[in-house]
Image (cartoon, rainbow, N blue to C red):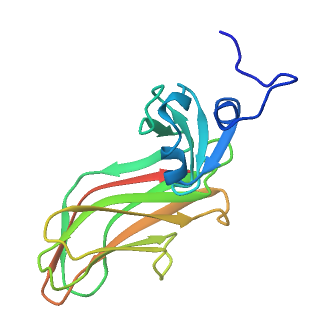
Amino acid sequence: MVLNKWTTGDVITEIAANNRGIRKGTEAEIAAIPTASNELGDIVYNSTEGYVQVQTAGGATDKRGNLTTAPIVADDTEVTHIGVTPTEKKNFAYFKDSSGVKGNQLTIVAEIKTSNAGTTAHLRVRTDGGGGDDLDLTTTSTAYVVVSGTIDISAKADGRRTVEIFLDDGSGDTISQRLIEVYAI
């Protein structure tokens, strides 16, 4: 394999810059890179998603994978809650550690639905036993939808950390939560 690198006299073009370094851009800018300019292994920082990504198939702009996320937990146990009082339904722990998951951000991806489209169902994420919501993911859909968001954990000290998942809905209404995945970057 020959390293695709800069040499003296190279003319800097968008294609050359993309194929010889890390490109930074929004999802729309990265998706607009001409198909012929993409090569397997190209690296980009997607400022819309907040991740470093690698091109996993040459020539296909939608074939990128995140490099810097680490799965922390996945749970597909369905849980439900009736009413307006936020109630803890799931929790887990992880280590934030510079020799493992250094951890600057948690990304939460979950499926939720409500029994009543006239109310808003809430999946509230709290960290380290704190009283306030670090993230509030909502829906008014009566069919499962995927919701996601991020939590900045860069200021948290290394060590054992916890994440608690609380659910609530309208008075007498039921929120259901199915699959949840948590990633760290």
Q: Which residue is at the front of the view, 96 or 152?
A: 152
As displayed, is residue 63 above or below residue 114? above
What residue lies at 28% left-to-right and 86% top-to-bottom?
A: 85
Q: Is residue 175 left or right of residue 48?
A: left
Residue at the limit of the structure toward the right, as seen here = 8
Where residue 108 sits, quadrant-wise, is bottom left
Camera-side residue of 39 and 64: 39
Extreme residue toward the bottom, this view: 171
Left or right: where 2 falls relative to 50:
right
Residue 12 appears anywhere in the view: yes
Q: Residue at x 48, y 25 (%)?
A: 58
| Res. 70 in view | no
How many marks on residues?
0
Instruction: Name the spot of residue 77 as percent of width and height, x first.
Output: 22, 55
Seen at 46% across and 28% down, the residue is 59
Height in image: 79 above or below 12?
below
The location of residue 116, given as percent across then percent down, is: 12, 80
Residue 123, by quadrant, is bottom left
Quadrant containing the N terminus is top right
Residue at the spot 23% in from the left edge and 62% down from the top edge:
145
Residue sitting nearer the eye, 31 or 44: 31
Q: Position of residue 105 (x, y in %)?
A: 57, 59
Residue 88: x percent and y percent?
32, 73
- Work out whether 53 lies above or below 2: below
